[in-house]
Image (tube, rainbow, N blue to C red):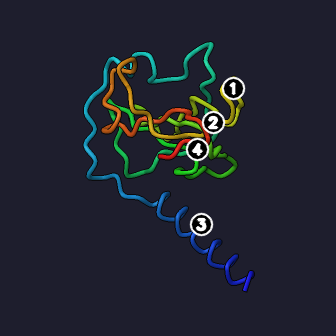
Amino acid sequence: MRSTFNYWVLLWFTATLAVASTADYSKLKLPPTPVYLKEYGKLRPGKSDKYTGCMCPPTLNTAGSVYMFCGHEMSPKVGGTCHPPSVYRCVNGQAEAIMEMDCSVESVVGKRKCGTRWICDSLNIECEKHNAKACVAAQMKE
């Protein structure tokens, strides 16, 4: 009985990963974000931004714009890694995503995970249209 349960959990997990990494973003039309790109369009000196080999979906057109993901929603290139609890941004048509926050690092508020960002005023983007992400408390529900 237990092995059957494990089988179904593994099957569900595999299917979830397959769907997440093969989603079709070709019909998604992102509004331009020139103010955002000026600061976040590349690696920011003195910040935790870095490339980890995590690839933006090939059907996603971010030219002149941005779209965000949690690491578990993405696929790595050969030899790369997508850190599941981290926040990534795909910007301005770049193939490789920029990891901007590692949510697994404990903070003074406790454990965190990557989740939906609801307020984006300081980023000059519309949260929902750009799939904005942030580190949220691990016990928070989406």
Say whether marks 2 and 1 touch (CB < 8 Å). yes
Mark 3, residue position: 13
Farthest residue, direction right: 2
Q: Earlier in the sequence, mark 3 or mark 1?
A: 3
For numbered disc 4, what is the local secondary structure? strand
| Disc 3 crowd, CA 10 A, few/some/many (<14, 14-19, 20+) | few
Q: Residue 11: x, y in percent?
A: 60, 74
Q: Nearer the viewer, mark 4 or mark 1?
A: 1
Q: Earlier in the sequence, mark 2 or mark 4?
A: 4
| Alpha carbon separation for disc pair 2 and 4 | 20 Å
Mark number, residue 107: 1
- In the rendered structure, which amino acid carries the disc numbered 1? Ser
| Disc 1 crowd, CA 10 A, few/some/many (<14, 14-19, 20+) | few
Q: Earlier in the sequence, mark 2 or mark 1?
A: 1
Mark 2, residue position: 112
Against 20, is 39 above or below? above
Mark 4, residue position: 54
Q: Nearer the viewer, mark 3 or mark 1?
A: 1
- In the rendered structure, which amino acid carries the disc numbered 4? Cys
| Alpha carbon separation for disc pair 3 and 1 | 28 Å
Q: Examine the image and state in which quarter residue 53 appears.
A: top right
